[in-house]
Every structure is written in C-alpha cells, then in structure tokens.
Image (cartoon, rainbow, N blue to C red):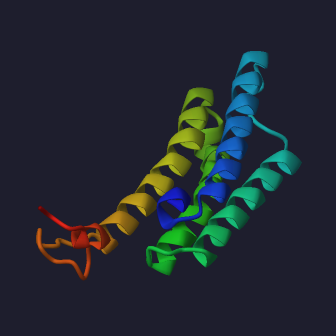
C-alpha cells in the first residue's frame, strides 16, 4: 500500500522489516519456540505502525485514512494467538498469529484499492495523464 501510494523508499524499508520478521519467525519455529519475546514483538509492531502512518502522510493516491489505520493495526492482530482458548493449541496459535495480521493487511489493501478505483473513458485526458500523448 505504501508503494502504491507513491513512497517507494519507505516500501524498501518495510520490505526489509518484513524480511527480518519472517527470518525471526522461521528461526523461532525451527528452534521449537514459536513465539517472540514481548520486547521484540512490541518493537516490530511499533516499527510497522510507524511506517504505515508515514505512508499515510506521504500518500499521493488519496486512500481513506481508516485504511491506513487498519494497516497500522494489522501487526498487532498477531496478539490473537495469545488468547486463552487459542494459546492452549499450538498449531491454532501459529495459524492465528499469521492469518490475523495477513487478513487485516489484505482487507486494508482491498478496501483502499476499491475506494479509489475509477472507471475512466479511453479518451478522458483529465483522469489519465498518459492520454494526452500525440496519437498519429
């Protein structure tokens, strides 16, 4: 969503944070302890939320503000794996910890894309900046 909003440099930083979080998750799963420490989890959630709000500040595509807030809250949805009914089942805990943030992020992206989708005619040069090219 940050990349689509026009802030490509921040998208690279978020990609690096995502790769780091994925590496930590794979290492934690390999070791046999599929949860991060509270300090690391809080740091990652804060970093992702800050990046989402930075993307909102530099948004050139006019996504609705609530989609950015949903995107910023998506990493915190991993806490659903710690609920009492889910925590007692290790596989369900892992699935909830992965699917809840991914679902919230996908919902934010889908809502943002649907809210800004416009249907422009082929000859409408007011909405399509590339339609003003000279056609032979």
Q: How many labels does the image show?
A: 0
Horizontal and vertical percent for residue 66? 49, 77
Left or right of 115 on screen, residue 68:
right
Left or right of 135 on screen, residue 62:
right
Query: From this viewpoint, which residue is outermost toward the bottom?
Result: 126
Horizontal and vertical percent for residue 94? 60, 33
Frontmost residue, 30 versus 64: 64
Left or right of 18 on screen, residue 41:
right
Q: Which residue: 78% across, 48% down?
A: 41
Horizontal and vertical percent for residue 13? 71, 51
3 to 84, vertically: above or below: below
Q: Which residue: 33% across, 73% down?
A: 116
Query: From this viewpoint, which residue is outermost toward the front?
Result: 136
Location of residue 49 (image quadrant): bottom right
2 to 117, vertically: above or below: above
Horizontal and vertical percent for residue 83? 64, 49
Q: Which residue: 11% across, 68% down?
A: 122
36 to 7, vertically: above or below: above
Location of residue 112 (image quadrant): bottom left
Q: Which residue: 76% across, 58% down?
A: 47
The quarter of the picture where the C terminus appears is bottom left
């Amino acid at each position: 969503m940050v990349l689509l909003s026009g802030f490509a440099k921040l998208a690279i930083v978020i990609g690096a944070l995502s790769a780091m979080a994925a590496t930590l998750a794979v290492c934690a799963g390999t070791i046999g302890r599929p949860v991060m420490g509270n300090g690391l989890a809080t740091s990652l959630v804060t970093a992702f939320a800050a990046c989402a709000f930075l993307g909102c500040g530099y948004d050139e595509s006019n996504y609705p503000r609530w989609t950015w807030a949903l995107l910023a809250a998506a990493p915190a949805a991993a806490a659903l794996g710690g609920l009492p009914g889910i925590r007692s089942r290790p596989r369900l805990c892992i699935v909830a910890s992965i699917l809840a943030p991914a679902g919230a992020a996908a919902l934010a992206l889908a809502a943002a894309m649907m809210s800004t989708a416009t249907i422009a005619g082929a000859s409408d040069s007011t909405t399509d900046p590339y339609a003003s090219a000279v056609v032979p």
